[in-house]
Amino acid sequence: MLFTPRLFALNNRAERETLRKPALIGQSVCIIARADCSFRRMRLAGRSADAKKAAILKARNEALADENGIRVEVDRPAGAQSSASAGPIMAGVWGYSMHSAHAGRYLPEAVAQVPHSHGARLVKGLSGFDGQIWNQGNLIASRWWGREPSDADWSVFMRAAGETLAQQGGADLAVSRPAAIDVPWRSDLPVFDIDRDRLSQMFSPARLARAAFALAGCFAFYTAGQYARESLALSGVSEQTAALRGETQQIQSERRRALANMSFVRRYRALGDNGTVLAGFGALTNVLGTSDLGIERMSLRDGALEVRLGGEDEISVPDVVTLLEAQPNLANVSVSLDGAKSLIVKADLLSPQTLVAQTLRNANPENANPENLSPANVGERGPQ
């Protein structure tokens, strides 16, 4: 069998001595030597689980002080007998001491050996000799000797076992002592055998608390590891972010400086050519230069000039408009009075290039084509 239980025994130093190795895997079973077991017969109230529990409770009350392990082996009924005619239900009760070196499964030596069908046999055990009486595959009586028993010892054992066998209606057995034999271990042992007592021992509050503490410790260790790992990753990201932040701030500063320069250039270009502004001042000077009018405010937007003049001299608005219209670099002139001492002049200011182009167009209509108004052509025609 692939899952044969592993059998071992504990020596005087609580060390494990393997009795049978499993073929592949199996539950570890500690074999209790016959010298360390007690055996007796007990009548059961039935074959139910409650009847077996009652037998275990009674066996615990009658057990020795050091016997904290109890195993009840209920007799198997004969095949030809019915439950009604089988008579009282009997069981073999084993008592033994469990060792702290093993908290698992225990089996008495006689239970772990191959059973006998009927009759008596003398078995060489782990420590001494075990006399056994079997009836229809059930162990009726057992007696242990530290050395091989004599014929007298065997006769005493047979007389005591005969009374037990007679009570159960068994046949008479031969009184002669059989030869001692070695009995192999059973191969039909269940792979796992966990009763309620074993379950209560396995899942005791102390063990559950230790398991919960271990799980909590593993979870805390895992969480701490994850936290440390994420902290290191976050620290690395923070360092990279700090390095990129300096470069980003420098790039943004240069971008803002470039945008400011571009805005200044746009505003500068919106003002027009420097010569255009000077030409506008020159036109105003030619007309109003002899008066005491001074410039209080001036604005130039998209070629539209607006000048606010203030002074004590009284001037003729129509005459000023006529004189300003006569200036070559002013167009669409309008003059208005703002109070008694303020004069507002509005006009379109022509750039020098546009003024030269208009002059050439008026002098020679053939050069009205915009392609002939390049600076080179204007320069060539200037002296003519």
Image: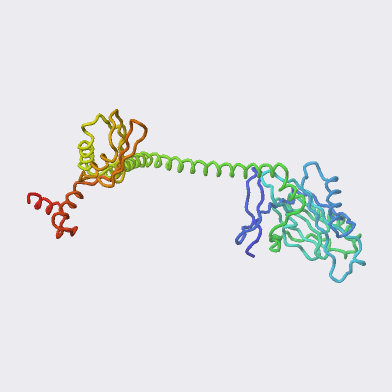
- Looking at the figure, which quarter contains the N terminus? bottom right
Would residue 375 appear left or right of 319 to someone viewing this image?
Answer: left
Residue 212, x across and y down, in percent:
66, 44
Does any portion of residue 258 appear in the rendered image? no
Image-quadrant location for residue 174:
bottom right
Residue in the foreground of this view, choosing between 5 and 136: 5
> What is the x, y in percent for residue 295?
28, 32
- In the image, residue 289 above or below residue 3: above
Q: Residue at 80% x, 61% y: name it.
A: 120
| Residue sitting at x 84%, y 70% | 79
Is residue 165 visible in the rendered image? The answer is: yes
In the depicted view, which residue is nearer to us: 157 or 73?
A: 73
Looking at the image, the residue that sits furthest to the bottom is 80
Percent coordinates x, y for residue 362 in the rendering: 16, 54
Q: Quadrant of residue 246?
A: top left
> 30 and 281: which one is in front?
281
51 or 174, which lies in front?
A: 51
Return the x and y of residue 87 as percentages of the image width and height: 91, 63
> Among all residues in the image, which is located at the extreme left?
384
Q: Is residue 82 above or below residue 5?
A: below
Looking at the picture, the colour scheme in use is: rainbow
Residue 255 located left or right of residue 90: left
Q: How many marks?
A: 0
* Left or right of 123 in this view: 17: left
Quadrant in which residue 130 is drawn: bottom right
